[in-house]
Image (cartoon, rainbow, N blue to C red):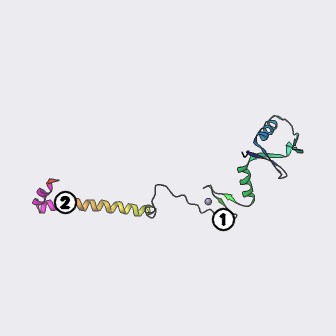
Amino acid sequence: MITKIQLCIQMRSGTELWLDEDRIRRIQSLLENIESSKFLNIDGQTINTADIVGIFDAKTMAELVRRKNGEHLCKHGVWHKRGDVCDCRPIPEDQTPERLSLSNDQEKNIEKIKEMTRILIEDNKSKSIKINPAYQKGSNKS
Ligand SMILES: [Zn+2]
């Protein structure tokens, strides 16, 4: 069984009229072409087009219900209950948990330590060359 898409005509009174998409499309084109309000017969019910708030899809109507219940959609696209404060935190994809635990200062310190270590190694190499010329000969193979 194919489930037809339904849309909702919402009335100023709060009444919701759910109709199949093809019927809604016909009503929409009618509404776009009338210049003054009109009474429409929908399944034996009469509505005044002046009292139509809008025509909405199921997603919009579901969001409306949530908002009526006090829920709010935060900037991360998550619904929160009434009174709840958003605690959603975006997790950057390229950061591992270890990297996340390092502050910028810590990162800078690590870079400094790496640089100091490199200088010490270079320094030791040149010293060992001076102290022991034989070492230089021996290491030439590489
Ligand atoms: Zn949130």
Please rate how many residues cluster around mark 1, counting C-alpha atoms within 10 Å: few if below 14, some from 14 to 19, many from 20: few
**1 or 2: tag closer to the N-terminus:** 1
Magenta residue check for 133: yes
Q: Position of residue 71 (x, y in %)?
A: 70, 60
Residue beneath the point at 24% across and 62% down: 120
**Pick the front one: 101 or 93:** 93
Magenta stretch in the rendered image: 127-139
Residue 75 falls in image quadrant: bottom right
- Closer mark to the observer between disc 1 and disc 2: 1
Residue 89, magenta (yes or no): no
In this image, 4 relative to 87: left or right?
right
Which of 101/14 is in front? 14
According to the image, label 2 marks what residue? 125
Q: Position of residue 47 (x, y in %)?
A: 88, 45
Q: Which residue is situated farthest in the front direction here?
A: 1
| Residue placed under numbered mark 1 in the picture | 84
